[in-house]
Image: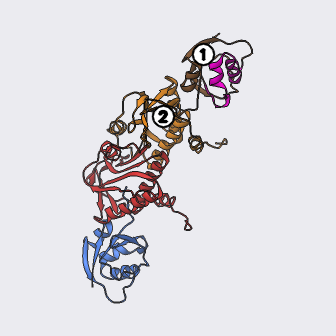
Chain colours: A blue, B brown, C orange, D red
Amino acid sequence: MTTRLIYFAWVRERIGMPEEDVELPAGIETVADLLRWLRSRGEGYEHALQYPDVIRVAINQEHVDHREKISGAREIALFPPMTGG
Amino acid sequence: MTTRLIYFAWVRERIGMPEEDVELPAGIETVADLLRWLRSRGEGYEHALQYPDVIRVAINQEHVDHREKISGAREIALFPPMTGG
Amino acid sequence: MSAVLVATVRIQRPDFDVAAEIAALTQGRVDIGAVVTFSGLCRDEQGALSALELEHYPGMAEAEIGRIATEAGERWPLQGLTVIHRHGKIAPGENIVLVVAASAHRQAAFEAADFLMDYLKSRAPFWKKEHRTDGSEGGWVEAKETDTQAARRWKRPPSE
Amino acid sequence: MSAVLVATVRIQRPDFDVAAEIAALTQGRVDIGAVVTFSGLCRDEQGALSALELEHYPGMAEAEIGRIATEAGERWPLQGLTVIHRHGKIAPGENIVLVVAASAHRQAAFEAADFLMDYLKSRAPFWKKEHRTDGSEGGWVEAKETDTQAARRWKRPPSE
């Protein structure tokens, strides 16, 4: 299944693109697994995700924590802590 | 010395006038003394001041409690609990 | 410690314009991050009220609200503060009172506006009389014990 | 228990008009006694900022603010609630965000607006980047721990 990954703010800048569609390999079950796998994909990803604890994640436009299962996610967004308001 | 008494809301309505100038007799030292003396001045006063605890008092446009000394007051206002805002 | 707050206090018959009052505090400034406004309106949930008539103590009303505003300026770092209280007859749905508090940060603006309203309710010399749609006088609105209690939230310990 | 609150949520580039948003909630009604507005503005105390650029997550921004507004409507008896958050470049002194909360009573309106702002700050998917007057990028604004703590004030005990 294809999953759309969306990036915002400095996560977007460091990875170097606003979004991409990926095929998740077997064994990527949680958000934490996804972040680990993405870091292995190149320098930009490593720079963006080197401190995974600060990365906020939304699945299908709802906040989730890093233990959340990602099976069936159409859209997963990664971004820094929010600074709106 | 002449003191101006000012009345508001139902205190004004019951006493039947918005203000008056009075000469305070000797022995009227505190707000409580004043309220007691006024009640003796007639039915309207008695009706307005029958529950003196609920009457709020300002001397020279500042809130005071009933133990306050009134010597030197130019203007003493009597009114019900406030309901502004 | 900080610049003295110059508050604007107005007691007036006409309605006020919230946007104009916000603009008066913020125009041309870049040090304000938060503006909180409170508008108090005349309610009539039973449909029996034709108007509230607001009586006030001229002179003391301005002075007392000024004292409350000064205390707010001492307790919170405010860039601006405006209080407008209407008097006379006010129909259901109309504005009665406006507080505008401006600060660098949101918590100061929220707390100062909240404090102002609690103190206004319990200390500003205004009294409301009801006029009914059937032409009768509905009598004077009674002060609420909950308003007195709300004002007590802000009492500082005597040691401070 | 009470009627479901229909909140208005808008994410937009243009500025908003506080008076128009208040009027939209109160016009023709006599059951609203209190309207609290919060306006958040772009500050620049050092004089080095040319603009904040607000990035957001379209779709989720509306959805998340809608969820926060729904929660506010469940926690306080509100007659109306409007939240407008701007995006794009915003110069110092300009508005960024507006919350308008209307209720019969003042405490509900104050608390709901305060809650909305705390939750917006910590949960709404917006990010601010600084642009400097010297033409350089000032980088992304960092989230404040105080904002996270402010949002925690509203956590309800799990037993409720």
Q: Position of residue C28 (x, y in %)?
A: 32, 38
Q: Residue furthest bottom?
A: A26
Label 1 crowd bin: few (<14), some (14–19), many (20+), radius 10 Å: some
Q: Chain of mark 2?
A: C
Q: What residue appears at the point 34 percent right and 79 percent down from the top-left corner?
A: A39
Q: Which residue is mark 2?
A: C4
Q: Nearer the viewer, residue C42 or A27?
A: C42
Write down the region rendered in magenta: B29-57
Q: Main secondary structure of the magenta part?
A: helix
- Distance in Å between CA atoms under marks 2 and 1: 30 Å
Examine the structure image and report whether residue B31 is included in the region drawn in magenta: yes
Q: Position of residue C103 (x, y in %)?
A: 43, 44
Label 2 crowd bin: few (<14), some (14–19), many (20+), radius 10 Å: few
- Mark count: 2
Residue D93: quadrant of the picture: top left
Q: Position of residue C85 (x, y in %)?
A: 44, 32
SS for tag 2?
loop
Q: Tell me the amino acid under the disc marked 2.
A: Val
Q: Height in image: D55 above or below D91?
A: below
Q: Chain of mark 1?
A: B
Q: Height in image: D149 above or below B64?
A: below
Q: What residue appears at the point 29 percent right and 65 percent down from the top-left corner?
A: D59
Q: Which mark lies nearer to you, 2 or 1?
A: 1
Q: Tell me the amino acid under the disc marked 1.
A: Arg
Label drawn at residue B74: 1
SS for tag 1?
loop
Residue B66: quadrant of the picture: top right
Residue D127 visible to the viewer? yes
Q: Nearer the viewer, residue B21 or A8?
A: B21
